[in-house]
Image (tube, helix red, strand yellow):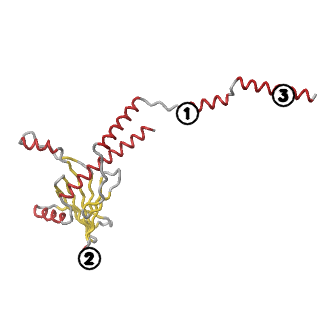
Amino acid sequence: MARALLRRALSLSAAAAAAAAAHPTPRFTAAFASSASSAVAPLRSPLDERLRRLLRSEISYIAERRPPYPPPSSFKSFAVEDRPGEQWVRLRAARAGAGAGAEEVKVEATMFDGAAEPPPEDAPLFQRVESLERGPRLHLSLIVEVTRGDRVLGFICSAWPDELAVGHVLTLRESGSGGRDFVYVKLDSAEREAVIKFLKEREVDEELAGFLHEYMANKEKMELFRWLKTVESFVDK
């Protein structure tokens, strides 16, 4: 009886092996299908492909034709403080002195925030031609603080490519709550000349205005290049 059961079990095993050879198991088929589906990349829309081409073209143009240069970290006695993505830049300079005579000069400059009006249509022809050849005359806003001990003078200035104009002067006044309040001071022509001389002695002048214009033009390129690369990486995902 035992031998008969053994022969029956062997015959059933042989039959199962033959059936397995003739028909693949569902497990193998599922594994094959899974690997095949993972090997196929997801389809992208024509809009994605066109956007990718445009981004790569613009990135290549900036990188090859007008690449930004590494920004300088100083200008004259000023140290430049800049962070990627910010729309302003800060410069600091320290002037040595004994005791309360030591000063700190801080300049905060915005990126381009305006442009000069073009000449009117009835202006002389040479002025209109000169304006077209020169291109737009861009504007930067500056806030300058000169600190000496517990005294602070503030200046709101307009920086053009070759000129620095003083708009307002601010003096610090302690508020009742312990904070700081700035008071506007109106200047006559003689006082304005004295303020311009005061700032020039601290290297806040037309040379600084020209430096900031070049710096901000390069910063705009860097920010644009960084933004395009970010968008490209987002589209590629």
| Above-or-below relation of 90 to 117 | below
Q: Amino acid at mark 3?
A: Leu
**Which of marks 2 and 3 precedes in the sequence?**
3
Which numbered dot is residue 28?
none
Q: Nearer the viewer, residue 194 or 231?
A: 231
| Above-or-below relation of 155 to 129 | below
| Inter-mark Cα distance, 3 to 1 | 41 Å
Q: Which residue is mark 2?
A: 98
- Which image quarter: residue 184? bottom left
Q: Which residue is mark 1?
A: 38
Q: Are marks 1 and 2 in contact (CB under 8 Å)?
A: no
Residue name at image x 59 percent, y 32 percent: 34
Q: Is residue 96 left or right of residue 127?
A: right
Element under disc 2: loop
Image quarter (top left, top right, bottom left or bottom right) of the C terminus:
top left
Image quarter (top left, top right, bottom left or bottom right) of the N terminus:
top right
| Inter-mark Cα distance, 3 to 2 | 106 Å
Element under disc 3: helix
Mark 1 or mark 2: which is in front? 1
| Above-or-below relation of 119 to 89 | above
Residue name at image x 15 percent, y 45 percent: 134
- Which image quarter: residue 55? top left
**Label 1 crowding class (10 Å Cα cut-off): few <14, some 14-19, many 20+?**
few
| Inter-mark Cα distance, 1 to 2 | 73 Å
**Which of marks 1 and 3 precedes in the sequence?**
3
Q: Amino acid at mark 2?
A: Ala
Mark 3 or mark 2: which is in front? 3
Q: Which residue is mark 3?
A: 10
Element under disc 1: helix
**Which of marks 2 and 1 precedes in the sequence?**
1
**Residue projecting furthest to the right:** 1
Q: Are marks 3 and 2 in contact (CB under 8 Å)?
A: no
